[in-house]
Image (spheres, rainbow, N blue to C red):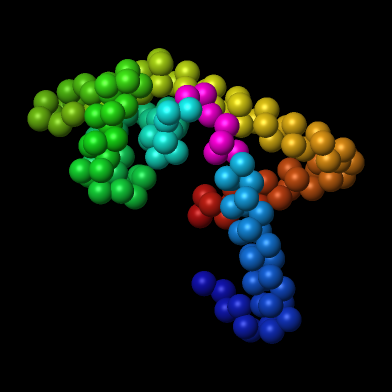
Amino acid sequence: MPELDAEPESGAALRAAATDLRLAVFRLARRLRCARAVDAMSDAQLAVLAALRTHGRHTVTALAERERVTPPSMSAMVNGLEEQGYVQRTPDEDDRRRVQVEITEKGAEVVAGTIRERDELLAGMLAELDLSPDEVALLGEASALMRRLVER
């Protein structure tokens, strides 16, 4: 990890930028989380569906590790999603003792609908700002930096 205090002014500026970014991301994420295709679905359930849609089928244990929850918590969450028809369990092709969890078409539709709603909400928020082309380009650059940050 880089030493923040190696250059005091630069380290202070980096910490201030980190604080500003954290606050802005937190507030934006909170507003975006309000938009979802199914009101009764929790953020955690939606995250599981999104992970399955993006990364394919997983065991309950692998899903728990990916989402940083305990296997019993993930099992309960998968049970609820399965009861609602958003996921299904299938025997593992290589080891019949293991079970894979995969998203159903209904679950994929919820994820796609939520993404669409959130994108529309954010696009509307940005449109209200009447951004210049340079500001839109700057947002694109900031998005790329944020992706680099989280994909490390």
Does residue 34 belong to the magenta stretch? yes
Residue at 69% from the left image edge and 83% from the top image edge: 7
- Choose between 121 and 112: the one closer to the eye: 121
Percent x, y for residue 102?
A: 31, 25
- Choose between 30 and 9: the one closer to the eye: 30
Q: List the single residue furthest toward the left.
A: 97
Percent x, y for residue 75?
A: 23, 37
Magenta span: predominant SS is loop
Percent x, y for residue 85?
A: 32, 18
The magenta stretch is 32-38
Please tell me in which quadrant of the rendered image residue 40 appears: top left
Residue at 61% from the left image edge and 31% from the top image edge: 118
Q: Is residue 47 visible?
A: no
Q: Is residue 22 left or right of residue 73?
A: right
Q: Is residue 30 left or right of residue 43?
A: right
Does residue 53 belong to the magenta stretch? no
